[in-house]
Amino acid sequence: MLGLSAGHAHQHPPAPRNIATRSRPRRHARSPPPMKIAFQDRPVIFVDLEASGLGRESYPIEVGWSVDDEQEPASFLVRPATSWRFDDFTEAAQAIHNIPYERLISHGIAVETACRRLDAAWTGAVLVSDNPAADGGWLNRLYQAASRPYPWRLVDFDVLDAALAIQYGGGYEKLAAILNDADRHWPVPHRAGPDAQRLHKIARAIVDPRYREALTGH
């Protein structure tokens, strides 16, 4: 994936080729068209998870992903598996994501259904997360609960944004400025779908000078 290792996020990776593509047609003259990120003809999907807590026994409660930065991100709630304990759903985590346990029971989908949806949506894509260790661990728990083999490898967002900065100009100084602006323009909502789309928008700002200038003025 990306020809880069998620364990070397702070090194200067080689710039990948053909990493960004624009979707057509343009929506209107004043706004840059929506942008999908791709690598070697494989779509890049930005993913994020919300979880019951941060402990070793925490489990995923929401999965979200973004393919197009101007479309609604996809997401679903996960109904806790019978092997996941209520005691591992913490008040501290709920204070961040504001998803009550009762909503998982009433609106969450079964772990087997969740895995099938991810298999259908993600197969063949490069998956990018800003916390691949945690998100990968929760995804693994999801697949374990469904008695399915875990198929994914997540790429660190730090690796992707560094590669984009090298390829599309500006280098690390411009990248640092964009990341500093990100919290102001795209505050972290702590919901899986919007969080994934936030990563997508940051990546687009690195790639697309018109989009970046329209948002940040520089």
Image: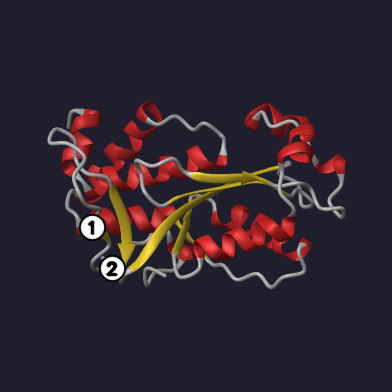
Which label belongs to residue 1?
Answer: none
Q: Residue at x 18, y 44 (%)?
A: 26
Q: Dots 1 and 2: beta carbons under 8 Å? A: yes
Q: Nearer the viewer, residue 205 or 107?
A: 107
Name the residue carrying label 1. Answer: 166
Quarter of the image for residue 174 reads top left
Query: Is residue 208 found left or right of 11 in the rendered image?
Result: left
Q: Nearer the viewer, residue 198 or 15?
A: 198
Residue drawn at 25 percent across, 53 percent down: 23
Give x and y (percent) for residue 62.
64, 44
CA gap, disc 1 to disc 2?
A: 8 Å
The picture places residue 46, in percent across and down from the top left corner, at: 45, 52
Task: Describe the element under mark 2 as helix, strand or loop.
Answer: loop
Figure quadrant of the N terminus: bottom left
Which image quadrant: the C terminus? top left
Which residue lies under the disc numbered 2? 14
Identify whether 40 is placed above or below 164.
below
The quadrant holding residue 118 is bottom right
Residue 137 relative to residue 27: left or right: right
